[in-house]
Amino acid sequence: MAPPTVLPETFARAVAGLRSVVPRDEIRLEEVGAPKRLAPYAFALSATVLRDGDEVATGRLILLHDPAGHEAWNGTLRMVSYVTADLEVDLAADPLLPTVGWAWLIDALDTHGADYRAIGGTVTQTMSTRFGELAGAAPAGDVEIRASWTPVDADLGPHLLAWCALLASTAGLPPPGVTALPDHRSAGTG
């Protein structure tokens, strides 16, 4: 059954808030198809984070809306987030990475005034070493942060700004307005 053409006011306002956000230059947002079976109404964004022209992190943010409410959500709106980034192996191996990754999310939400409740999620760290025909590439690591939370109100601009801050932290971008110093080791001067 197709959803009605007239969107509920709460959902329409929430989507408008998401569409109004302009992220920092290194983050590219794109509207993508949203899952259709999780809630009667859904909207999704994908993100790519670039550092020095290289893709260093990706993510997906999904807004779900069920006008009847959902007991587990403790509300009618739900934000679902997925972020993943490549890391240097020593960072990927750090036993504190999951705690730090979760703190990036909570700090971003709190810093941007994105009030929430019923938050939950996981932080996964992985390291890969290639063998056989795939040998030769350096060991690789990554972090994946999956989370969902219920926004307290339908103004979701602060939630998207917080999510962009999470992406930036995960990708290792310097804070806005700060320029990273060049890595002289790779230039052969160290």
Image (cartoon, helix red, strand yellow):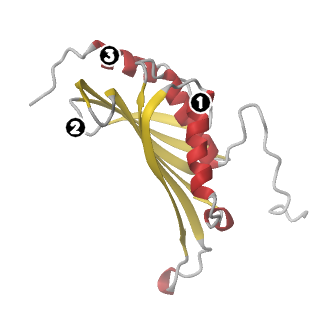
Residue 71: which numbered mark, if any? none
Q: Residues within 10 Å of mark 3 (few under 14, many from 20)?
A: some
Residue 10: which numbered mark, if any? 3
x and y, in percent, of residue 141 in the image:
58, 65
- Where on the picture, by quarter, is residue 46? top left
x and y, in percent, of residue 140 in the image:
58, 68
Q: Are marks 2 and 3 in contact (CB under 8 Å)?
A: no
Residue at the spot 63% in from the left edge and 29% down from the top edge: 111
Kind of element beneath mark 3 = helix
Residue 36: which numbered mark, if any? 2
x and y, in percent, of residue 122 in the image:
46, 52
Mark closer to the chain start, 1 or 3: 3
Q: Nearer the viewer, mark 2 or mark 3?
A: 3
Residue at the spot 51% in from the left edge and 43% down from the top edge: 48
Mark closer to the chain start, 1 or 2: 2
- Residue nearest the viewer, comparing 79 with 43: 79
Residue at the spot 26% in from the left edge and 40% down from the top edge: 35
> Up-down: is 164 above or below 142?
above
Pick the quarter of the image with the C terminus: bottom right
Q: Nearer the viewer, mark 1 or mark 3?
A: 1
Q: What amino acid does circle 1 point to?
A: Asp
Q: What amino acid does circle 2 point to?
A: Lys
x and y, in percent, of residue 64 in the image:
31, 31
Residue under numbered circle 1: 110
